[in-house]
Image (cartoon, coloured by chain):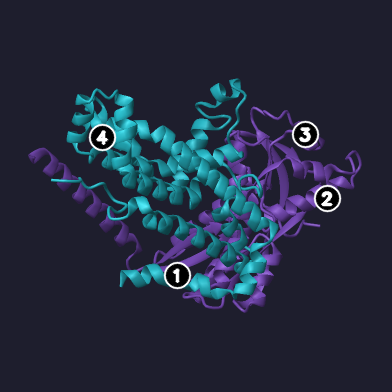
Chain colours: A purple, B cyan
Amino acid sequence: MARSRSVVLACSAAIALIAAGGRASVGPKATVVIFAAASLSDVFRELGDTLERRDPAVHVAFDFAGSQTLAFQIVQGAAADVFASADNRWMSYVRDSGFVAGEPHTFARNRLVVIVPQSNPGRVQTLQDLARGGLKVVLAGVEVPAGRYARDVLSNLEGAQGFAPDFRLRVLANVVSTEENVRSVALKVRLGEADAGFVYATDVTPDVARYVRVIPIPDASNVIASYPIVVLRHAAHPGLGRAFVDLVLSPVGQATLARHGFTPLESAH
Amino acid sequence: MLLCLLALPLVSLVVRLSPAELWSRLQQPVVLDALRLSLLTSASAACAVVLLGLPIAYLLATRQFRGKRLVQTLVELPIVLPPTVAGLGLLLAFGRAGLAGGALRALGITVPFTTLAVVVAQLFVATPFFISAATAGLGAVERRYLEVAATLRAPPGVTFFRVMLPLALPSLLGGIAMSWARALGEFGATITFAGSLAGRTETMPLAVYGALQSDLDGAVALSVLLLVLSFAVLLGLRFAPWSAGIGIQGARGHGP
């Protein structure tokens, strides 16, 4: 029928236009691939834009996931130029496996917070409330940096004033899901499905903040997450990788990180 | 060749570990937990898909009605939907804060993060596989037999269970096998909707993904197990006596 034929034609034209448009923007550019921890999504995308503005011949592509997933993929031969991890453990794994070019540099630090949905269905007001039976707590998995940090925080809190000696065990008994990356934890809380979750302070972006309440963790019991970054040994574009790392370590990069809530390097204890 | 593309990854998985190593890894609690959970949830999903899907397949195969094409499209949709999208949709629909969340809560039911959520996710993605096979099978039953049954004054229920169903059985079994296998391998919707917790929601595909992050050989062992199970299902149904000579795809008419 004439009508369905013209619909098909219109769709084909649309697809061709979109494909052509896509190719045009990636065409003669060099693409530098950055593997970065999920918690770096917003700040690194902004820094990627900055790098592209400075050098229009460069396209910055990102793969954001749990650091453990990325480290594993790199060691299995994934093609990336730069790796930014949320902890030293996975960076050491990549380094000890012989996949780094040069020494990793710490470029940012982060702290953990507890978030609950705006409506607070679990009626969690204080950290102690997390141990109450029947709550739905979501953590990142044990292999994920954010997951390990969260469990460390629970251990720290257990030893602190005002917390029961079995605090950590009781909270862990409330865990209903162990997510692959910290942003998934934030998502479950933001959607109101979890009663509480442990995320980085930086994961409470303006978009997320509208839907959650933050319960801070006292500095004395909190962990300071260290983020190292390195150019990878088998990088296809080591020079561009180096440029991105330099940007991250530069005053511009540091200011951008600070603006997104990362703890400045100098003031960390 | 395409067959090499299909065969080589499977062979690579199987040869990676020695049988002794494989056996010892398969006895770890995390593996047994995941296995038990996978079998329980996929079997439940397969049962549910048959009980709930057969009436729909019957209607689609034998009746014309307004909105039939809409129903057909709806039933086929989960195949083209990326599983993670399905999971997100399920969360937004049946989550505590979802569209149906209030109603479910009033009934005392919360779905996310439970084993029920795993079954629901599997049911969602497996439905099209059964319904399309069942519809084709039931639709291929020759009208003559149904008419003969009617002249013998058989009530519709008897006609369905004693005439249509046996003739359509190979297609139905094929549909059950495919939907069961799809449910067994389901990952994206499960991890988004049900989350991942050992013993409660961490099915074998999720356990493989988790193991990949720290223990490659553990992941391989789980993968081989999953492979063997899926193979058993598909082969078992292909060589079962009731599908002999007719094949998984469809019931061909008997007689002239």
Within 10 Å of disc 4 (Cα), the crowding (few <14, some 14-19, many 20+) is some
**Rendering coords of residue A143 (x, y %):** 67, 59
Q: CA distance from mark 4 to mark 1?
A: 38 Å
What residue did someone put label 2 on?
A: A155
What amino acid is labelled 3 in the image? Gly
- Considering only vertical position in the picture, is B88 above or below B30? above
Q: Is residue A90 visible?
A: yes
Q: Do badges 4 and 2 share one subunit?
A: no
What amino acid is labelled 1 in the image? Pro
Tag 2 subunit: A
**Element type where label 2 sits in the image:** helix
Tag 1 subunit: B
Residue B61 badge:
4
Name the foreground residue: A187 vs A254: A187
Q: Do badges 1 and 2 share one subunit?
A: no
Q: CA distance from mark 3 to mark 1?
A: 45 Å
- Residue at x 63% of width, y 68% of height: B23
**Rendering coords of residue B87 (x, y %):** 49, 42
Residue A161 badge:
none
Tag 4 subunit: B
Is B164 left or right of B239, judged from the image as shown? left
